[in-house]
Amino acid sequence: SAVAKRPVSYMDASNHGDALTGGGQQSVFSQQKQTQRRLVRIFPRGHRTRSDNFLPLSYWASGAQLCALNLQTNDLATQLHHALFELNGGRGYVQKPAEMLSPEPAWPPSRLQLHVVTLRPITLFQLPARSEERPFLKGARQRAHAYVGELSYLSPKSKKAAGQGQVYFPTLAVELHAIGGFHVVSPTLPPTSGSTRSLVKATSS
């Protein structure tokens, strides 16, 4: 196939990330042009001993087709991975935007207007506390509790930490993770800062 005949590049995640950051947006456009002809797979550094992941957003924005993630670790990178590849119905691939495949790629494209999405939480109650058990998996997936104890409904530590009879006022963190371009989370319009995270707190009233 045409894909099989393309040359493949293997890149160290930390070194590749430094190059992208240091070169600015033009460096990103140059990488996007390279990945039109080459398959690029990003690996973490070989001497890493921890099981956490690097964030793949900047590598996806540069056009890299493959990021080697440890999907056994349920961290932000893994959640972003699942969120991205759900866009195509879980078929295992997502097409690149047209702007990334043009003769002179420029992703993200320049826009005169922001795309605004409004999120209105109805209630924060009945949500689990930070130290409370979650989630409770049944059936064949119940075996996952033995491997992800900190997120487990069956975790004895979680039950003890949650306590009994405590009044709990939960908070909801709203975060926005984009593959390139300006993005912001703000409780007001126009945005007062460039923050991509906002906390929504419950009140006693």
Image (cartoon, grey):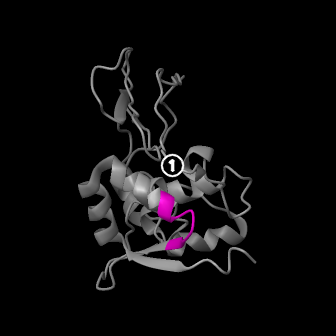
Looking at the rendered image, the quarter that the N terminus falls into is bottom right
Mark 1 element type: loop
Looking at the rendered image, the quarter that the C terminus falls into is top left
Does the stretch in magenta take in 4? Answer: no
Position of 1 relative to 141 (above/below): below
Labels in figure, total: 1
Instruction: Find the magenta span and give its range.
Output: 33-40
Q: Residue at x 29, y 71 (%)?
A: 15
Q: Residue at x 47, y 78 (%)?
A: 9
| Residue 13 horizontal side relative to residue 135, left or right | left
Residue 110 rendering spot, x and y as whole percentages:
46, 32
Residue 7 rendering spot, x and y as whole percentages:
56, 79
Q: Residue at x 36, y 19 (%)?
A: 204
Q: Quadrant of residue 159?
A: bottom left
Q: Amino acid at mark 1?
A: Glu
Q: Nearer the viewer, residue 199 or 103?
A: 103
Does the stretch in magenta take in 35? Answer: yes
| Residue 98 horizontal side relative to residue 50, left or right | right
Residue 123 rendering spot, x and y as whole percentages:
51, 25
Which residue matches tag 1? 104
Q: Quadrant of residue 170?
A: top left
